[in-house]
Amino acid sequence: MTIEQANAFLDSQMKRYKESLSHGHFSIKSRSSIEATFELLYKEYQRQELPNAETQKIISNIQDVRNTVSENFVELKQSVSEGNTEIKTISQYTTKRDREEEAEKIRKIKLKEVHTQKKVSSTSFFSRNNENSLFRLVWEQL
């Protein structure tokens, strides 16, 4: 039996009791006992009342908070997603920059090696020419 059905039954029985009471069928002692029984049953099967203005206001505030939390959650989720994208972009940039720096170091090392080889080669060329020049001078003088 639902609460509505129980209340409908109690209402019909209360109506019958009041009719019988008006005819004087119950003693004062039995009346108080019957009324206490009805009171107890009505409390047990209490009707759910419609929310009053204060309750409506509380429910409205709770819904507002819920909506705000949902909106904030969506914004937070979006911010985290954008942050992850930015982190990936920074990571890609850093990786690219590291590769470029490494390539630049290798290029400088090779450039130094080439420069050193040219210097050694030019030094040995000049020394050979100097020797040859000295040798020529000596030969010519003889």
Image: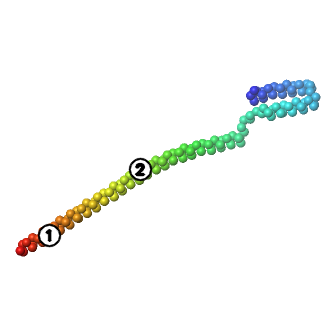
Identity of the residue drawn at 51% across and 45% down: 78
Three-letter residue code for mark 1 = Glu
Q: Counting residues from the N terminus, which is met first, the one under dot 1 or under dot 2?
A: 2
Q: Is mark 2 on a helix, strand or loop?
A: helix
**Where residue 106 appears, x then y in whole percent?**
32, 57
Helix, strand, or loop for circle 1?
A: helix
Instruction: Look at label 2 and name its amino acid.
Output: Gln
Task: Residue 12: give x, y in percent of width and height.
Answer: 81, 25
132 displayed left or right of 95: left
Residue 87, x across and y down, in percent: 46, 50
Observer-nearest residue: 133 or 22? 133
Q: Which residue is drawn at 6% across and 74% down?
A: 142
- Structural crowding at the residue carrying mark 2, measured as other residues with C-alpha within 10 Å and reported as few (<14), some (14–19) or many (≥20): few
Q: In this orientation, which residue lies closer to the viewer: 18 or 10?
A: 10
Q: How crowded is mark 1: few (under 14 residues within 10 Å), some or many (20 or more)?
A: few
- Horizontal side of 22 relative to 133 (left or right) equals right
Whether residue 64 sits left or right of residue 116 in the image: it is right
For image coordinates 48% across by 48% down, the residue present is 84
Whether residue 68 is visible, yes or no, is no
| Residue that mark 2 sits on | 92
Which mark, by number, is residue 131? 1
Among all residues in the image, which is located at the extreme bottom?
A: 141
Q: Which of marks 1 and 2 is in front?
A: 1
44 left or right of 76 in image: right
> Which residue is painted at 11% across and 71% down in the image?
135
**x and y percent of residue 17 in the render?**
86, 26
Tell me which corner region of the image, top left, top right, bottom left or bottom right, holds residue 61: top right
85 or 104, which lies in front? 104
Disc 1 to disc 2, C-alpha distance: 58 Å
